[in-house]
Image: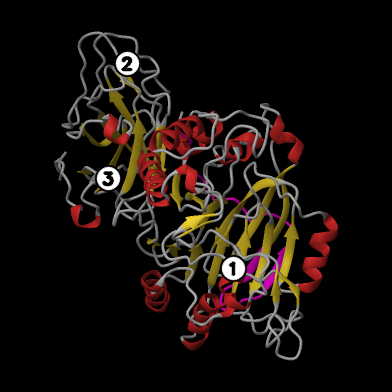
Amino acid sequence: MAITRRELLRRAGMLGAATLIPSFTACTLTVSSGDDEVGEDTETDTESESDTTGGGDGLPEYAWEGEPGPETIFSHGVASGDPLADSVILWTRVSPASPDEAVRLFFEVAVDPDFELRVAADYIDVEATSARDHTMKIDVDGLDPASTYYYRFYAQGRVSPVGRTRTAPAGASEHLRFALASCSSLAHGYFHPYRELSTRADLDAILHVGDYIYEYGTGYYGEVREYDPPHEIVTLSDYRRRYAQYRADAALQEAHRQHPFIVTWDDHEIANNGWLGGAENHTDDEGSWAARKAAGTQAYFEWLPLREGAPGRVYRALSYGELVDLIVLDTRYEGREEQVAPASDGVEAFYEDRQLLGVEQESWLLDRLASSTGQWKILANQIIMGQLIITPGDEGELNGFLLPDIWDGYDAARRRIFQHLIDNAIDDVVVLAGDLHISFANELTIDPYDGYDPETGEGAVAVEFATPGISSPASGFDAGTLALLQSLNPHNRYVAAGDNGYVTIDVTPARLQADFWMFPPQLRESPEFAPGSFAAGWSVASGTARLSEAGEPAPAKADPPPLAP
């Protein structure tokens, strides 16, 4: 077998100077149909004083002599993310006996869960140290498109759990499936939706659109589970401890182990209702906003398996071949101006120069939409783009909106995007959102009271799906409020609140379908897992911006690769 050795930091031009990720190149491995069978699962002995792996394939082997490290050294599991057609980010964290200890790791990647067919293996020259909270990310490239791989790490004679990941397709695809998730308040209960997602073998990736953690102290917002640290998190040490607590959760850890994640942040990764220059949940006695934002940002990039470019930048695009162009946005901290005060008349929200994305990100988005070669343009965004109007404008007056923190508080920015779609005849645009812990299926229009026909969908320029929270409650929206909102917002074709859950996004060349999977709120208070149920399905046909209700979930993908053992 020809071996392509490691190309350390080959992609350095993509990365920030302080956050360089080691890069490794896999060797090509072609498996004929007659060689597809793999052996029974074998348990790696992590207790031995000399733990080895590999052999016979020409790739480096791991060996350790001496006393093994702590049994809990891989207590935060493994993860992968930001898959491209030929590469993926692999992540782990080690917990050595001494917090100041530097730990050297070894990794291996295979096409089978027993690692009999390895494609990459090597020692990582960059050690895991306290400078990055002992987290480690590597970029493994040279992989085949639309392929499933299994991976694991070794350190101090111990082996991590086996992870499973998948690359994006490079050309045409007939079927892709993603899951959409957001808003996991650990204080409100247990992450059953994550657990269920970990069992769905046919997902290409999980799209997480923010509020991965919450910054509050114990008892402030939810009382089912206590936080570590127990106080509101402000410092780098605080944020790191909170991520460590979240990633010790078995359900979240298992979802990461089985699927690549594509993430963006919302506000609670730093502070509630944040914007470029501050947050509603930040006060002067908590220190400078710049220091707190830097701390939250550093911990986020340490603990999440996303690629690192310009420091603090999370907006990016990932191609899923000819079928999907996935555009990940930052509507929270990149360029957002401060929210309109709730007591104001809201006129400021309609100012022509008002920014949500910021000039640079907005220009990048418009260019990306115009130049996209993907049939479906999926915008993974934090907040609801469809209007939530409470007082319709009359005779030219402005519409009165419910929430200044969503796109309604930045109407001019939304109009610029919608007009760009119209002017450039860009169709098959789908927006994904979270934030409110409410399920939505929306037809997107510049103004639902001007030029839009809810009976036919004429005047809509795109569609939107919003996911309920993993565990966060949809407080303040009872059935009467939802019914009133829907009557005033006919473009909100589907609205549901109260349950937790996630959404699957099923994509074919002919249509895109969103299926809503719900968990009754009482389940989140019990650590015992209970499955969710199909609540609704809504689809949009290619070339239209009209939503149609689906009576059943989209068919599963055929012959999904086996889950990691």
* Residue at 69% from the left image edge and 45% from the top image edge: 473
324 is within the stretch colored magenta = no
Q: Nearer the viewer, mark 2 or mark 1?
A: 1
Disc 3 marks a residue whose amino acid type is Asp
Q: Which mark is residue 97?
A: 2
Q: Nearer the viewer, mark 3 or mark 2?
A: 2
Comes first in the chain, label 1 or label 3: 3
Q: Is label 2 in contact with label 1 (beta carbons under 8 Å)?
A: no
- In percent of width and height, residue 520 lies at 75, 41
- What residue is disc 1 on? 340
- In percent of width and height, residue 386 lies at 63, 70
**Circle 2 residues within 10 Å: few <14, some 14–19, many ≥20:** few
Residue 522 or residue 313, whichever sits in front: 313
Residue 290 or residue 40, whichever sits in front: 290
- What residue is disc 3 on? 139
Alpha carbon of mark 3 to alpha carbon of mark 2: how far?
27 Å
Alpha carbon of mark 1 to alpha carbon of mark 3: how far?
41 Å
Q: Secondary structure at mark 3?
A: strand
Quick check: 125 left or right of 409?
Answer: left
Compared with 340, 248 (above or below) is above
* Residue at 56% from the left image edge and 54% from the top image edge: 280
Q: Secondary structure at mark 1?
A: loop
Magenta-drawn segment = 538-564
- Residue at the right extreme of this rendering: 480
